[in-house]
Amino acid sequence: MDLRIENLSKTYPNGVRALDNVSLTIPRGMYGLLGPNGAGKSTLMRTIATLQEPDSGEIWLGDINGLREKDEIRKRLGYLPQDFGVYPRISVQDMLDHLALLKGFVHRKERQELVESLLARTNLLQVRKKALSGFSGGMRQRFGIAQALIGNPQLLIVDEPTAGLDPGERNRFYNLLSEIGENVIVILSTHIVQDVMELCTNMAIIHEGRVLFAGVPEKAVGELAGKIWQKSIQKPEIKECSERYRVISSKLIAGRPLIHVYSAEPPGDGFQPVPADLEDVFFSRIAGLQ
């Protein structure tokens, strides 16, 4: 079962065009939706999750029309938004039990078995009696995944899940998402390139509401082969280099800017070739160089 998004557009009353004729086919597995803040990712996620209406276009989950059969989509959907509220004094076990009841699990024994399996799957069983207010960022995100998995969804939407997590928590979250993605469609919406590099077999880059690339990350990286060059410079040289070359990124290494430039030919002037990576793809696409 694939998720098909066809010619989806959305303009807000303030004139911001959040989605501009977006079309994507998303197969089962981990799918990365990569873009800077304000690119339209959250608008797309909310629209898929039936939380808002587009101006035009269609969404299909298999043969289910996502805009006309919203209840059928919701039955098959798990959603972890970027920000979600909880009752802070309630334990994670009681909160999951309450949410399972709201999702239609009315038999107490069935609900208990479901909650216990979700706690075990997200490694929260030992803290099941702990109030959510005492959770770390990583534990809170694992709870978010647990509630999203109630009902064995066929489509899981995860919006900016690793923002604010320390490296250990991020790795644990990666492992959990990878396991889930073996059996369902998981859309990972993020502005963090590493998230997509680590997790996703397919991806799209979205900017200003438009899809700039959709496909396999390795293919996008391969298209940049031999076109990325780097050089360590002094800080005062940044402006001059930006005027002379197609600078796609700059980061400080030992206090000195290390710039990457896009060029089909050797730029000379001390630049060295460097293997392209997904970060180069992201910045070159955003800059309109491909």
Image: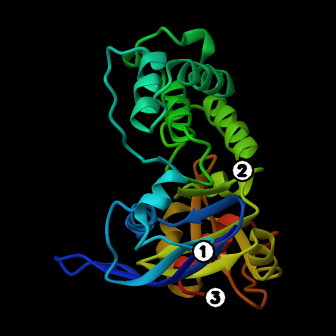
Q: Which mark is residue 100?
A: none
Alpha carbon separation for disc pair 2 and 3:
30 Å
Task: Residue at the far left: name it.
Answer: 14
* Secondary structure of the residue carrying numbered label 1: loop
The residue to which callout 3 is attached is 290
Residue pictured at 50% horizontal, 35% vertical: 147
Mark 1 or mark 3, which is nearer to you?
1
Decide which of 155, 130 is in the foreground and name it. Answer: 155
Alpha carbon separation for disc pair 1 and 3:
34 Å
Mark 1 or mark 2, which is nearer to you?
1
Q: Which mark is residue 63?
A: 1
Kind of residue at disc 2: Gly
Task: Residue at the far front: name it.
Answer: 107
Asked if labels 3 and 1 touch by Cβ distance under 8 angstroms, the answer is no
Kind of residue at disc 3: Gln
The image shows residue 17 at horizontal and vertical percentages of 31, 81
